[in-house]
Amino acid sequence: MKRRRLFLAAVVLAALAAPSAEASWVPLPPPDSYVVHPVSCPYFDEPGVACAVDRRVTYWQEGQSARTVTGQFELWVPRYGSRVFEREVLLHELGHVFDVLSLDDAERQTFAAIHSYEVGWRERVGRSGGGAYPGTVEELFAEAYALCGLHGFERRRLGYRVRRGRWTPGVYGYSPTRAEFRATCKLIRGAA
């Protein structure tokens, strides 16, 4: 009886840890391309704010077309007391790094087209999906990256649900349909 309970507990834990049927994996930027500070972003007066800052420097050699890039992105992700929420915020900030390092303009345009965003990458989207802040397309991509990177059970713990055919909005109002969500996750995986 005890063995059966242990086996059943192992099966339940494995099911919770397994990716959901919908996309739940994103390629991560190279680990040497960023450093994470477990504190609030120093560029905001408000405590508990996360951010990503590009600290890379590009050097051009005279007479050469090659360039040398040194430095890293710095990510500030404070401790919130919830590992799942901290993972979502870290994935959001990594989404910014992934955007800069992995996406080209055509992939950015594809992301915008999937969601019918008709503004520039760093412009606010007119239809905010109900988030606390109206998001730029760039911020909505980072939200999409995080949502694609979360496992199904993590999304549920954070309150993400599909209602009336759309995901409930995140902080920046990212509220995709299921089809937009799947197409976005596929785009991200293909950009790696």
Image: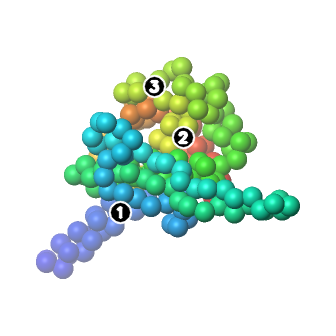
Distance between mark 2 and mark 3 Cα atoms: 13 Å
Mark 2 or 3, nearer chain start: 3
User: With respect to residue 51, does 87 lie above or below?
Assistant: below
Q: Callout 3, which amino acid?
A: Pro
- The residue drawn where x is 66% and y is 56% is 58
Q: Please tell me whether mark 3 or mark 1 is closer to you in this view.
A: 3
Q: Position of residue 70 (x, y in %)?
A: 60, 63
**Dot 3 corresponds to which residue?**
134
**Dot 2 corresponds to which residue?**
141
- The residue drawn where x is 13% and y is 78% is 2
Please name whichever residue, 88 or 41, is drawn nearer the observer in this view of the structure: 41
- The residue drawn where x is 54% and y is 40% is 141
Q: Callout 2, which amino acid?
A: Phe
The answer to whether 2 appears left or right of 52 in the picture is: left
User: With respect to residue 121, does 104 lie above or below?
Assistant: below
**Mark 2 surroundings: few (<14), some (14-19) or many (≥20) residues within 10 A:** many
Q: Position of residue 25 (x, y in %)?
A: 50, 57
Q: Callout 1, which amino acid?
A: Ala
**Dot 1 corresponds to which residue?**
17
